[in-house]
Image: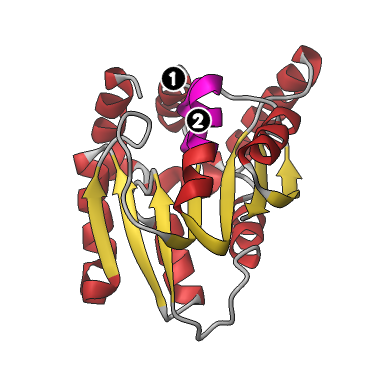
Amino acid sequence: MEKGLKRVFDAAAASYDSARRKLVPCFDDFYRAAIDLIPFERDAEFDVLDLGAGTGLFSALIAYSFPGARITLLDMSEEMLSRARERLGPGGARFRFVELDYAEHAFEGRYDAIVSALSIHHLADANKRALFRRVHEALNPSGVFINADQVRGETDAIEKRSYAKWLQRARELGASERDLEQARERMKFDRTATLSAQLEWMREAGFREVTCAYRNLIFAVYSGEK
């Protein structure tokens, strides 16, 4: 990913979580939909890779929902991972933290679930497609890939309306102009793609049972199985 993006997220780490519920107006349903796609019993033991894990928010929700899950958190921002360690460090060996730009470098291991939240949309389309192939290869048989992310409207008009409505809802929930300014600074690095394109790229990568479980304005949760 672009070096400037790393600097932006390093700088935002300290305050990143405080505005999440305002900047993701559908926060609860968005993350709930992603958790519900994990196809394991609550007490099952399985291995998860969280791509672009940031401050560990998504991983924490998974860990709470599945006490037997072992989670590797991967992110290119040292500052973000530092926040994740603060959040999840008490869990000990159950959590592993890896500083790595998954767009530029291979990730190791085999996993039962590979997940990501609000990260992959920073990749150029060709890199998204390549990543989907690498994710498929890194999954164990019957493993699942779940992406909770920003997506582009299917047309320019839909994109414009969705963005305007997102901005309105964020302000209604109390997002400050500083919160919005920081969000827009990060969004300069967005490379969003339409949902339909990404579902097709997943099928091309070999995924089956490809589906979108949730969609709200600029946010979507979709998945596929190996």
Secondary structure under the numbered disc 1 in the rendered image: loop
Amino acid identity at mark 1: Phe
Q: Is residue 187 above or below residue 105?
A: above
- In which quadrant of the rendered image does the N terminus lie? top left
Q: Mark 2 Cα within 10 Å, few/some/many (few <14, many 20+)?
A: some
Labels 2 and 1 touching (C-beta < 8 A): no
In the depicted view, which residue is nearer to us: 104 or 78?
104
Q: Measuring from the top left, give residue 149's x and y in whole percent.
A: 57, 40
Q: Is residue 160 visible?
A: yes
Q: Which quarter of the figure has residue 9?
A: top left
- Return the mark for residue 83: none
The answer to which of marks 2 and 1 sits earlier in the sequence is 2
Q: Residue sitting at 75 percent across and 49 percent down?
A: 211
Q: In this rendering, would 225 be left or right of 19?
A: right
Q: In this rendering, would 7 be left or right of 23?
A: left
- In which quadrant of the rendered image does the C terminus lie? bottom right
Q: Residue sitting at 80 percent across and 14 percent down?
A: 157
Q: Measuring from the top left, give residue 105's x and y in whole percent.
A: 30, 34
In the depicted view, which residue is nearer to us: 99 or 183?
99
Q: Which quarter of the figure has residue 110?
A: bottom left
Q: Residue sitting at 57 percent across and 53 percent down?
A: 145
Considering the whole magenta stretch, tell me its main secondary structure. Answer: helix
Amino acid identity at mark 2: Ala
Q: Measuring from the top left, give residue 209's x and y in whole percent.
A: 74, 54
Secondary structure under the numbered disc 2 in the rendered image: helix
Is residue 170 covered in magenta? no
Is residue 120 covered in magenta? yes
Report which residue position mark 2 lands on: 130
Q: Which residues are magenta?
A: 119-132
Report which residue position mark 1 lands on: 189
